Image (cartoon, rainbow, N blue to C red):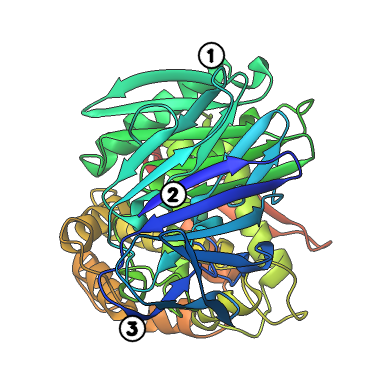
Amino acid sequence: MRYTIKPSDDGFLNIELEFLPTRTGIWEILLPSWRPGRYQSQHFAKNIPSLLAFSGIRECAIQKIASSAWQLSVTDLSPIRICYRYWAQQADAGGSVVAADLLYINFINCLVFPKAWENKSCTVHIVHPATWQTATSLRGKVGTYTTKKYRELVDSPFLAAPSVFSYAWKEGKTKFYLEGIGPATHFSKKLIQAYQQIAAFQVQWMGDFPVKNYHFLLWICPKPYYHGVEHTQSTMMVMGPPERDCYEDLIGLGSHELFHVWNVATIRPKALLPYVYTKEVFFDTAWVVEGITTYLGDWFLGASGVISWEEYVACLLGNLKLHFERDGRSEQSLLDSSVDIWLDGYGPALPGKRVSIYYKGALVALAIDLMLRQKFSHSKSMRDVMRLMQEKYGRLQAGYTRQDFYALVEEVYEDSLADFWYKWVESAQPLEGEIAALLRFVGLHFHQDPEGQFHLDPLPATEEIQHAFLR
Ligand SMILES: [Zn+2]
């Protein structure tokens, strides 16, 4: 498949796909209706007014048959060209933007493909002013990139602008980059050092890194914003406004997204392997994907020394409050809210209905970590779980089910955890007392004051125990 993308100054991308049909007859042309990282239909096709198709120089019939599907009648084996415009004005970490001084594309939004061609190789040619600089994990000479599969192309965001910041370093066998667009003050030495420390720590903690190149891509956008999306070889982060000091948000987000290289890009729920881009794919392990990553993303900041113990405790309390204050009495279990992520997982939901797969998921991850640390005096922890997940599911590129995850944690814990799963994952029981009991083991007193405010205070003379928690 060969794609050509030309931005126009009215906010659209002009896109052309050329491919050689392998048979005559009816073909289906599809556009993803969602993107990995946000498990919710976004119907990107709403940004395409119409498609035109040509066989050689002759126009051929193409008809819309569903929100993100078109039917094409192929009468001979000449190259097919499909031409359309895409309205690129979605300024978030998963969208695409055309502006006078910016070209930002998430190809998953805008590149149609023939049905069942997700594993075919792609070349994309992007037209932009010759003096502009670019940032992307795609390989090739500037402006033209080739991937082995459509899947890789749509997992690789692209940025171009008159000026792009770029800094690279090596960690183990991997070359890391911090690249992006925005005022130079945001691409500080302090941020680079933090990313170097976080990457070094995570790579050493997991034993190796799944990819050879990794790009932290950042766009400092004009409006107040905080959003990140994970990819196999990059993360796309959008922060704003430019006047704001984004350092603290950026270290937390960068650490979270980097761990997704293992936890979802490599170690993947079975239902998502491979990704089916054209329909909702329900899975009851969204809390494993986002909860463990939320918990560990913050824990890595403390453990790598990027933030202090006190800052880490404040961060942990923040996450506990986000669960207990908002969702502590919600009706749904973590399991039901995982499935419902497609329904109301991101925006508002009914009062008292769902729990956050991020924050209740992080609470479950914290509990698993603390139970392992307590039973094995810190000689086992969440690290044993994630390394075994990588060995059993990540490296083998085999998906896991909820039952697989349960069994694996129980293997590390060396006992059944049936009651734990029921209480913490499958039902909606209050957990304040349970987590408070576990936190005492690491010298932390979790309690609620008479006004209902939650606190996390160090217990007296427990400094050594506290520090063991960050190892
Ligand atoms: Zn995430």
Q: Is residue 112 visible?
A: yes
Residue at the spot x=55%, y=57% of the render?
A: 110
Furthest-right residue in this view: 451
- SS class of the residue under badge 1? helix
Q: Is residue 471 visible?
A: no
Quadrant of the rendering where the N terminus is positioned: bottom left
Is 216 rendered above or below residue 48? above
Q: Nearer the viewer, residue 57 or 207?
A: 57
* Spot occupied by residue 274 in the image (x, y as percentages of width and height): 31, 68
Residue designated by label 1: 189
Q: CA distance from mark 1 to mark 2?
A: 37 Å
* Spot occupied by residue 355 in the image (x, y as percentages of width and height): 62, 73
Going from N to C along the chain, the mark reached first, 1 or 3, is 1
* Spot occupied by residue 234 in the image (x, y as percentages of width and height): 42, 40
Instruction: Residue type at mark 1: give it.
Output: Lys
Disc 2 packing (10 Å; few <14; some 14–19; many ≥20): many
Disc 3 packing (10 Å; few <14; some 14–19; many ≥20): few
Note whether ligand 1 is within 8 Å of mark 1. no
Image quarter of residue 226:
top right
Residue designated by label 2: 3
Q: CA distance from mark 1 to mark 3?
A: 47 Å
Question: Is 458 situated left or right of 122 in this image?
Answer: right
Residue designated by label 3: 418
